[in-house]
Image (tube, rainbow, N blue to C red):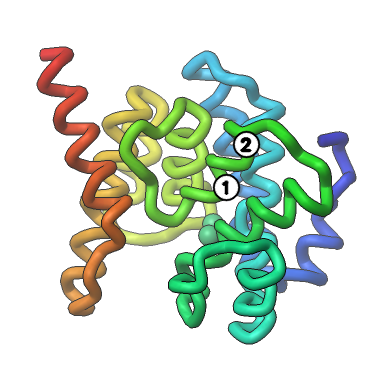
Amino acid sequence: MKEGCIGREALEARLGERRAAHVAGTARMAAELAEIHGADAEKAREAALLHDLFRAVSAGELDALIDRYGEDPALKGDANLSHGKVAAAWMKEELGIEDADILNAVRYHTTGRAGMSKLEKILYAADAAEPTRDYAGVEALRKRARESLDGACVMALESALRHLGEKGVRPHPDSRRALAWFSKQKGEID
Ligand SMILES: [Fe+2]
Ligand SMILES: [Fe+2]
């Protein structure tokens, strides 16, 4: 995607100032992680710029988009899960983006999944660790992401699951499968 295709002003109009800053921070960090870990920085930036494009639309609008793009009806009423799926479908249908890796990075940015590609890991880690994020442990996560994408994804997944557990929310199976997959990978490498 060319610079300016979705600029800061357009993002702010659509998402509000705070979320637009999060998206810009995610794009910067995703590009940096791509450079460090040998992935395509342009793809990483493109996925990051679009990942939360549907984060601020109403629940009703998201549900209508789930129908329009033939996404899983079980996602209805769960904006936290559906905004990435709808964004990926919209990118394919409306922007004509065919790159499966970019689409999957956006599609799975909330949960992660078993078998995540390098680009998916980059967006997952950058989303959690970008410079405007401010929570206990984020500095350690930023450092880890520069050393190891797998290490950072495991940290971020464990922290997400811990937070869900504290709120009494069952984690999505994709997140549990992602963690199991990372630990199996590690076992095979060790
Ligand atoms: Fe998101
Ligand atoms: Fe995000």
Residue 85 rendering spot, x and y as whole percentages? 56, 58
Residue 134 rendering spot, x and y as whole percentages? 42, 60
Q: Residue at x 32, y 32 (%)?
A: 144
Can you tell which quarter of the image residue 8 is in?
A: bottom right
Q: Residue at x 35, y 50 (%)?
A: 138
Horizontal arrangement in the rendering, residue 176 relative to residue 48 (left or right):
left
For residue 15, above or below residue 134:
below
For residue 80, above or below residue 23:
below
The residue where tag 1 is placed is 106
Mark 2 and mark 1: span between their CA atoms?
6 Å
Q: Residue at x 47, y 57 (%)?
A: 133
Horizontal arrangement in the rendering, residue 169 relative to residue 57 (left or right):
left
* Amino acid type, callout 2: Ile
* Amino acid type, callout 1: Val
The residue where tag 2 is placed is 102
Residue 158 rendering spot, x and y as whole percentages? 22, 50
Q: Label 1 crowding class (10 Å Cα cut-off): few <14, some 14-19, many 20+?
A: many
Q: Label 2 crowding class (10 Å Cα cut-off): few <14, some 14-19, many 20+?
A: many
For residue 71, above or below residue 107:
below
Q: How many marks?
A: 2
Badges 2 and 1: C-beta atoms under 8 Å apart?
A: yes
